[in-house]
Amino acid sequence: MRFEEVYDRWTEARLTQQEAAALLGVCERQLRRQCRRYESDGIDGLIDLRLGQRSTRRAPVDEVMQLVEQYRGRYVGWTVKHFYSKYREQKGRRSYNLVRLTLQREGVVSKAKRRGAHRRKRERKPLIGMMLHQDGSRYQWLRGQQHDLIVTLDDATGAIYSALLVDEEGTMSSFAGVAAVIAGHGLFNSLYTDRGSHYWHTTRAGGKVDRVDLTQFGRAMAQLGIEMIPAYSPEARGRSERAFGTLQDRLPKELLDAAITEVAAANRFLQRRFIPADNREFAVPAAESGRPSCPGSGPTGTTSYACRKSALSAPITASSTTTSSCKSRPTVTVATTSKRPYGSTNIQTDSWRSSMARVAWPTTLPTARSSNQNCDTPLNSPFKQHQQRTFSVLLKPDILTCY
């Protein structure tokens, strides 16, 4: 109903002030204010005086032009979201929507295509540490150089726990990723991987994995009590595949912006700057709080699990995808244990190197402390049989001393 009609009815006492205000959708105080303006200025007095005025929150023109020049001068090719994260790091105050609309209006970025319907995603694990993903991606991470990026991330939160660049993905790079996770966060329940030859043996290409004839990596995970889960399609590993899509878009640009051209410097950049920033932006809280039941988390977990010993050192015989330099130069790692955030035993390691590292042979191997050490592994157990078999095959044992 028009204001004039309501005003006439109210002045004729056919409507109370409360009823007139309800018809116009305003409070009684606002009705009295509008009536005073109508009586003094007519219908023009009802026009909102704020219309046509410049907003006090509007960004100055010079700031908007500086934003556009900043993108054109240094961040060409970056997505708006990636550029906005860098803009916020540099103490930018404007909203993401303003930055996006400004760059699109100036024509420096194009509007993203509308995404089509996607099949339902698998639900995340409810607890941190229930399942981790590990995968590698070969890409031009450094300008003019092809390397493999090995990433280990948590399924519950999507947080990246470990990421390192190596010359070629293999057994040692997988060990290094797992070692970094255990050293920083403790043991976990399961590891979801592809069917690479350093993870699994397959009787034929594309076939099912052999759960009896384990690889060196598989034997180590079995001794740690970590369940390995093979993926039979890239879609099954959608969470890690999407993470690599983001990494392939962002990491090369970040490394180029930081003028990094060497693998060692890139790995330091990953650990100190890129991974923490990525987790702050993309990691989500776990659905449930608490800790999963991991191996060695019971009352005697620390002692009994330490006696299992870790196979986290390189064998002489590596997978077919590993180069000769990776096959012939293993490392020795001494393992100690302590309680970690997952409520389980943590294995602290000494020096870890990438799959292509040049490492000298050890002169001596760790020896057992004493014969009366509290160890729950019987002499005739499969673990001892595996240790004897390893000694007969390798030039040095891959099972380390119990501490």
Image: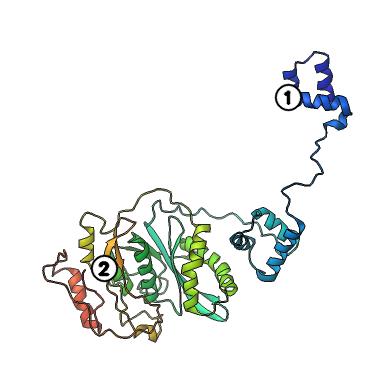
Q: Which residue is mark 1?
A: 29
Q: Position of residue 372 (x, y in %)?
A: 11, 68
Q: Is residue 173 left or right of residue 16?
A: left
Amino acid marked by disc 2: Thr
Where residue 200 sits, quadrant-wise, is bottom left
From mark 2 to mark 1, how far is it between C-alphas? 75 Å
Observer-side mark, 2 or 1, equals 1
Residue at image position (32%, 78%) is 314
Q: What residue does disc 2 label?
A: 336
250 displayed left or right of 309: right
Relative to the observer, which residue lies in front, 235 or 260? 260
Query: Can you tell which mark lies on residue 268?
Result: none
At a point 69% along the width and 70% down the height, the residue shown is: 73
Residue 64: image location, x then y, percent: 73, 59
Q: Position of residue 5 (x, y in %)?
A: 83, 22
Residue 304 as seen in the image, left or right of residue 37: left
Q: As drawn, which residue projects farthest toward the left?
A: 372
Circle 2 Cα neighbour tier, 10 Å, few/some/many (<14 / 14–19 / ≥20): some
Q: Is residue 215 visible?
A: no
Quick one: quadrant of the N terminus? Answer: top right
270 and 135: which one is in front? Answer: 270
| Residue 48 x %, y % | 80, 36
